[in-house]
Each structure stands twice: as structure tokens, then as C-alpha cells.
Amino acid sequence: MRNNIRENPWEFGGQIEIKMYRNIRRNAETIGLSPGTLIYIGEKQIEEIKITAIDYNEADFQEAEIHSVEECFHYKDKDSITWINIEGLHDIEVIKKLGNCFGLHLLVLEDILNTEQYPKIEDLDDYICIVLKMLYYDQQEDEIVAEQVSLVLGPNFVLSFQEGREGDVFDSVRARIKSSKGRIRKMGSDYLAYSLIDVIVDSYFGILEKLGEKIELLEEDLVSDPQPVTLHSIYNLKRELLFLRRSIWPLREIVNSLVRDDSELITESISVHLRDVYDHAIQVIDTIETFREIVSGMLDIYLSSISNRMNEVMKVLTIITTIFIPLSLIAGVYGMNFKYMPELEWPWGYPLVLLIMFSMGCLMLLYFKRKKWL
């Protein structure tokens, strides 16, 4: 456990506070602007935007890397299903051109460019916009990293917008489309959107597994040898769980809206699959709440352990003090230096007094042991 604790135990909490400050500062920059003003709120992750398009039906499949956003325009009117994935949101003109082509409202584009908002869903009849958080566990930094993913579901297309961090969780969906395994090539764009949401939700279980391992290691350290750094680790873990809860909690309402809303873009057959995603989301949220209760209990255990350790120290000091009180009394009596004290002239007075003091200390120790105070 010692190797898993950072050199700076407050590092993660400090990073969250810095991020919150930056988010507030960025959002303050939009005050006074008219609705629909497109401003990228977030950190630039890659130098150039990467656009890929996957077009398929039951019999055919095509994948292309798009070098110019205009190359995406002809996909809008095709009868096949098209998935256009955009990695990198800092080039506002590219996002705006793509949005104009597919008829996206400026407020929707504003939500896509604001990477610091809560997950949400917007149903605009012709299309549905879903904002989610894709989570990774950074092994080197030992922290959870969040990336915003926006999905736009249309009649025959799905647009996915990512911040552009290295890698994503969509590789399994791409592989299923390429190999024509399962039902994905036979279904419509709503099934594709469901598949993307499903892999995002499934990735949360990997994060929970990592946090569960951290909690187990921290519990062992808490029971064996609680130290001040243990308290810092508990505090950081609470912040991680709070961050995770804020990123995932709205997902329940998002999936529930997709299931219950009578949108023409969601067929009845897909609603069954979405209910399964809803169950997974509930399971993730319940696990997070369980972890939060465990960590809160760990904090109480730490405080109790420290209190018990202090009580043990005070008990030992009290016993030592109690033993030396009568010994100090005897030493004080014979340290008064009166001239007429008969014991001062005894040849064996000094060893007799030492024997009496030693006997009293032993008797008191036996008494304390019999009372089980030791």
C-alpha cells in the first residue's frame, strides 16, 4: 500500500480544485454573449482535428479518413447508415460547417463545444443530442480522467464528437461493424447510438474495479498501521468518488428519457436494449454510493483508531504516573532534610527504603494486571 500512495497526498484534490477554478473562469468568459455563440470551452487535446466516417448497410461497409469537412456532406442523403466521428473540438469552423450540413441548432453546437458541462439529452424531433462522459483510469497519474462525448442521432446517421484524447472505448463497435458480427449491420442508426452508449457505460465497470482495489488496499493499511498519509488517501478517494458521481449520475435520466420518450428515431426493438443499459447505469450508481458509504466509514474507523491509540498511550502514562506517585511521596518525605529523623542514622535505612519502594511498585503492577488494566 505504501507504494500506491503518492508522494504528494493532496495532489488529486488540488488538481480538482484547479480544474473547477478553470471551469468557472472559462464559463465566465461567455457571460454577456448572445445564445448560440460558439466558443470552445476546454483544453486543446490534439493539434489537428481527426474525422473518420464509417458507412455501412447489411451487405456493404466502407471506412474513410476525412481530410476536409466538406467530404462529409454527401453522407447526409445516403440510404445507408453513417457514423462520423470527430476527434478534437478546438476548430470551431469545422464544427459549425458540419452542424450546418446536418441541420444542428446553434445551441446544440454550443453544448458540444462546452466540454465542462453535465451529461444531458436534447430531443429536437429531427435528431437527438446526447452528452456523456467517457472515463479512463490513468495508471501513471493514478487518477480518473474524463472526456466529454457528444452523440447526435439522426434518421440515418450518428455524429460523435470527442475532445481528442488518446484512444476511446469505441474500438469494439468498430470491430463489430467491420466483421458484420451481431445485429449492428442489420439495424438502423438508433442501434448504433445504443451500441456507443452501451460501451461507454460498460467502461465504467473497469473504473469501479480499480476503485474497489484501492479501497481494499486502503482498508488493509487502515487496520494494520493508520498514519496521517492514510487520512489524506481517504480524502482523495472521497474526491474521486464525488467526481465519478457527478459524471455518471445524470446518465440514469438520459437513458430513461430515451426509453420513455416517443421519439420516431428510437424504435421499439431498441427500447429493450436501452432498458438493459438503464439497469447497468443503476448498478454503476449503486456501486458508487456503496463505495462512498464505505469510504465514509473508513474515515470514522481512522478517527476511532487514532483515538484508541491515544487512549492506549494515555493509559500507559497514567499507570506509570500512578506507580510513581507513592514512590515520589516516600522520596519527598526523606528529602525534607530535618535534623532529627531517626531513620537517617540507620545503617540499613537506605537499602530498606529502596526495598519498600520496589515492593510497592511490584504490588501495584500485580494489582493492575489482576484488574486487566495492563
Image: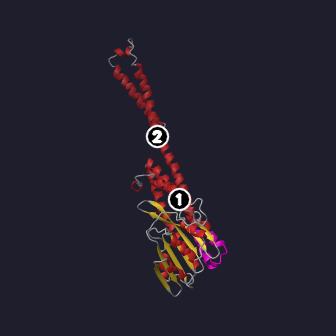
Q: Helix or strand or loop: what does disc 2 sit on?
A: helix
Q: Residue lying farthest right?
A: 262
**268 is within the stretch colored magenta:** yes
Compared to residue 313, the image places residue 339 above or below, namely above
Check disc 2: other Cα within 10 Å, few if <14, some if 14-19, many if 20+.
Answer: few
Q: Residue at x 51, y 50 (%)?
A: 299
Residue 156 appears in the figure: yes
Q: Which mark is residue 26?
A: 1
Q: Which residue is mark 2?
A: 312
Q: Nearer the viewer, mark 2 or mark 1?
A: 1
- Residue 4 locus on image (x, y percent): 41, 56
Q: Give the vertical position of 261 relative to 297 (above or below).
A: below
User: Count the marks: how many?
Assistant: 2
Q: CA distance from mark 2 to mark 1?
A: 52 Å
Looking at the rendering, the stretch of residues picked out in magenta corresponds to 255-280
For the stretch drawn in magenta, the main secondary structure is helix
Mark 2 vs mark 1: which is more N-terminal?
A: 1
SS at badge 1:
helix
Name the colouring of the figure. secondary structure
Tag 2 and tag 1, C-beta contact below 8 Å: no
